[in-house]
Amino acid sequence: MSTLALTVYVLIWPVLVAGVLAALCRGFFKEWLQARRDGEDLI
């Protein structure tokens, strides 16, 4: 495996993890704000 391919393979995982974390946080805060507006508990 070439050095460039290995470097890209190793560096893509933090980008994917950051994307998934951003999606989870966005969904959480969206639901949290909606629950606050409706006067409900989040759980």
Image (cartoon, rainbow, N blue to C red):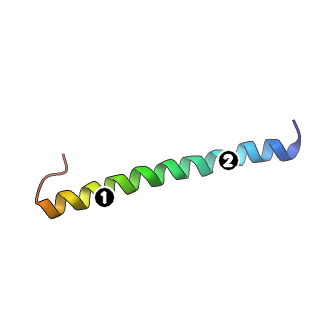
In three-dimensional space, the C-alpha distance between marks 2 and 1, rounded to whole angstroms, equals 27 Å
Circle 1 SS class: helix
Q: How many labels, in total?
A: 2
* Quadrant housing residue 38: bottom left
* Callout in the foreground (2, 1): 1
Local crowd size for mark 1, using a 10 Å CA cut-off: few (<14), some (14–19), many (≥20) = few
**As rendered, which of 7 and 37 lies closer to the eye?**
37
Residue 15 vertical position relative to residue 9 in the rendered view, above or below: below
* Residue 25 place in picture, x, y as percent: 39, 54
Lower position in the chain sequence, tag 2 or tag 1:
2
Point out the image quarter for the N terminus. top right
Circle 2 SS class: helix
Name the residue furthest bottom: 37
- Which amino acid lies under the numbered mark 2 shown in the image of this protein? Ile
* Quadrant housing residue 31: bottom left
The reply, left or right, for residue 24 in relation to residue 6 is left
Name the residue furthest right: 2
Residue 23 vertical position relative to residue 6 in the rendered view, above or below: below
The reply, left or right, for residue 20 in relation to residue 28 is right
Q: Which residue is mark 2?
A: 12
Mark sitting on residue 21: none
The reply, left or right, for residue 22 in relation to residue 30 is right
Mark sitting on residue 30: 1
Point out the image quarter for the C terminus. top left
- The residue depicted at 79 percent of the width and 46 percent of the height is 7
- The residue depicted at 47 percent of the width and 50 percent of the height is 21
- The residue depicted at 58 percent of the width and 47 percent of the height is 16
- The residue depicted at 17 percent of the width and 61 percent of the height is 36
Local crowd size for mark 2, using a 10 Å CA cut-off: few (<14), some (14–19), many (≥20) = few
* Residue 32 place in picture, x, y as percent: 25, 57
Name the residue furthest top: 1
- Which amino acid lies under the numbered mark 1 shown in the image of this protein? Lys
